[in-house]
């Protein structure tokens, strides 16, 4: 069962540089929320903190009722790069996130995760035998195999061509439908944000704060050609420009 992700008055500095400045965010159980904003505004830092990879911050991050004070067993994370172990085959890479990797239960979890990303036939392949899109699907399966209640994705399709990116977005939605995690996605791709998310959160320039929230109304499955999505994309672009212009005026 998925859990709520709550971020309250989050503040983060690197030395004298403020990166996140009093950020509040809540993602409901099984909701998909996309986070967009200018480069360098703190989006990836937000995910690192939510994943418990960095605990030096002020404020609170909770998964359900539990404070995040380090890596949390209920939280999965997919990075920008697949980060697969080149000496392990696909199945063993996926199983690496499990505490017990060799029993029948582990094999069943790995099988289900590979099935969710349509890579069952490549269980024995090495990473060097995979395309970039396939490798990223393995990374997604590795995050899903632990059946996380919260799944964090840091621009997971950014390095891929447009066609592959669209296919992986559909794989992600299929996996989300199967596992139903609470999902927080950082992306620079506005079309991706509108296609995947229930809500899009716009962060302002560093130090990051929420400056706008845009609900995405069309029900799933969505049509990428839906004029409603196109109109929402225009609204998001305008909000991004307003946030940037406000920063320039007040700087």
Image: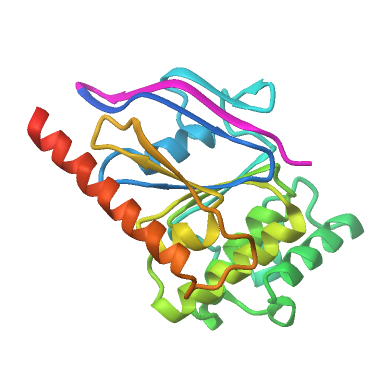
Determine if residue 93 is in view: no
Would residue 2 be counted in the magenta stretch? Answer: yes
Above or below residue 106? Residue 128 is below
Q: Quadrant of residue 41?
A: top left
**In which quadrant is the N terminus drawn?**
top right
Q: Quadrant of residue 108?
A: bottom right
Would residue 114 be counted in the magenta stretch? Answer: no
The residue positioned farthest toward the right in the image shown: 104
Q: How is the image coloured?
A: rainbow
In this rendering, would 79 be left or right of 143? left
User: Residue at the location (70% across, 42% down)?
Assistant: 149
**Residue 74, how many percent across, how many down?**
69, 38
**Residue 225, how many percent across, how many down?**
47, 75
Above or below residue 174? Residue 127 is below
**Residue 133, how many percent across, how many down?**
51, 75
**Residue 240, how many percent across, how many down?**
26, 47
In this rendering, would 193 be left or right of 22? right
Above or below residue 95? Residue 33 is above
The foreground one among 222 and 154 is 222
User: Residue at the location (29% across, 24% down)?
Assistant: 13
Highlighted range, magenta: 1-16
**In which quadrant is the C terminus drawn?**
top left
**So how many labels did they put on this image?**
0
User: Residue at the location (36% across, 42% down)?
Assistant: 202
User: Residue at the location (74% across, 77% down)?
Assistant: 120
Determine if residue 1 is in view: yes
In this rendering, would 23 be left or right of 241? right
Query: Which SS type dominates the magenta stretch?
Result: strand
């Amino acid at each position: 069962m998925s859990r709520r992700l709550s971020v309250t008055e989050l503040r983060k500095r690197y030395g004298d540089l403020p990166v996140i400045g009093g950020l509040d965010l809540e993602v409901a159980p099984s909701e998909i929320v996309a986070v967009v904003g200018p480069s360098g505004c703190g989006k990836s830092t937000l995910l690192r903190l939510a994943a418990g990879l960095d605990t030096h911050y002020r404020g609170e991050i909770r998964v359900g009722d539990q404070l995040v004070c380090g890596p949390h067993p209920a939280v999965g994370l997919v990075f920008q790069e697949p980060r697969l172990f080149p000496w392990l085959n696909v199945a063993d890479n996926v199983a690496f996130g499990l505490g017990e990797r060799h029993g029948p239960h582990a094999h069943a979890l790995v099988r289900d995760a590979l099935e969710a990303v349509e890579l069952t036939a490549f269980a024995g392949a090495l990473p060097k035998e995979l395309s970039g899109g396939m490798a990223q699907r393995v990374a997604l399966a590795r995050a899903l195999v632990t059946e996380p209640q919260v799944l964090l994705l840091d621009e997971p399709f950014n390095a891929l061509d447009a066609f592959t990116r669209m296919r992986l977005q559909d794989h992600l939605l299929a996996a989300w439908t199967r596992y139903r995690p609470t999902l927080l996605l950082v992306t620079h791709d506005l079309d991706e944000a509108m296609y995947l998310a229930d809500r899009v959160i716009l962060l302002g320039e560093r130090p990051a704060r929420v400056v706008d929230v845009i609900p995405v109304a069309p029900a799933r499955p969505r049509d990428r050609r839906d004029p409603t999505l196109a109109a929402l994309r225009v609204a998001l672009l305008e909000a991004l420009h307003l946030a940037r212009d406000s920063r320039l005026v007040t700087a």
